[in-house]
Amino acid sequence: MEIVAEENKTLVKSLLNKLTEVDREITWRINNSYSNGIDNTVLEIQIFESKIQTGRIAFQLEDGHVINYRYKDLEKRIPIQIMDMLLDIIGYELDLSQQV
């Protein structure tokens, strides 16, 4: 399970870095919100644009399940996996950049 968690964390960081390539004003950080030390770790991603928080995503590290999120005007749908969520956000930002 620990290997899967590390792989998930690496993929999440990679997608978040891709998001910063789409829009240079976007920054992010990941906080460990909860861990029982065995098989339940909840991480929270905070996304900022020009230092203003525009998104917050809580997800289960071990299986990638998104518990709750908000991101700008992105339509909410649950259940969703963290990888799908981040790809949706990247797509959302790409659409916004093409409208300008």
Image (tube, rainbow, N blue to C red):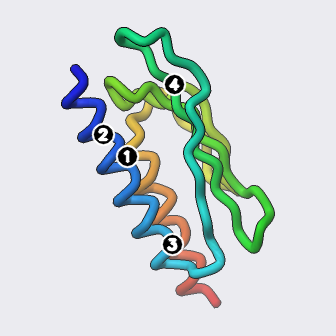
Q: Secondary structure at mark 2?
A: helix
Q: Position of residue 7 (x, y in %)?
A: 24, 41
Q: Position of residue 88 (x, y in %)?
A: 45, 55
Packing grade of label 1 (10 A; few <14, some 14-19, many >=20) is few
Q: Is residue 6 left or right of residue 59?
A: left
Q: Look at the picture and state if 6 lies above or below 2.
A: below
Give the mark nearest the N terminus, 1 or 4: 4
Q: Position of residue 27 (x, y in %)?
A: 61, 66
The reply to whether the C-beta atoms of the residues labelled 1 and 4 are less than 8 Å apart is no
Picture mark count: 4
* Three-letter amino acid code of the residue under disc 1: Asp
Mark drawn on residue 20 = 3
* Three-letter amino acid code of the residue under disc 3: Thr
Classify the position of the N terminus by image quarter.
top left
Packing grade of label 3 (10 A; few <14, some 14-19, many >=20) is some
Q: Secondary structure at mark 3?
A: helix
Residue at 67%, 51% (x, y): give it.
55
Residue that badge 2 annotates: 8
Residue that badge 1 annotates: 84
Q: Look at the picture and state if 57 lies above or below 90.
A: above
Please identify, in this view, whether the residue under mark 3 or under mark 1 is nearer the observer: 3
Which one is in front, 69 or 21?
21
Q: CA distance from mark 2 to mark 3?
A: 19 Å
Q: CA distance from mark 2 to mark 4?
A: 12 Å
* Three-letter amino acid code of the residue under disc 2: Asn
Give the mark nearest the N terminus, 3 or 1: 3
Q: Secondary structure at mark 1?
A: helix
Residue at 38%, 35% (x, y): give it.
81
Q: CA distance from mark 2 to mark 1?
A: 12 Å
Mark drawn on residue 75 = none
Which one is in front, 56 or 94?
56
Residue that badge 4 annotates: 42
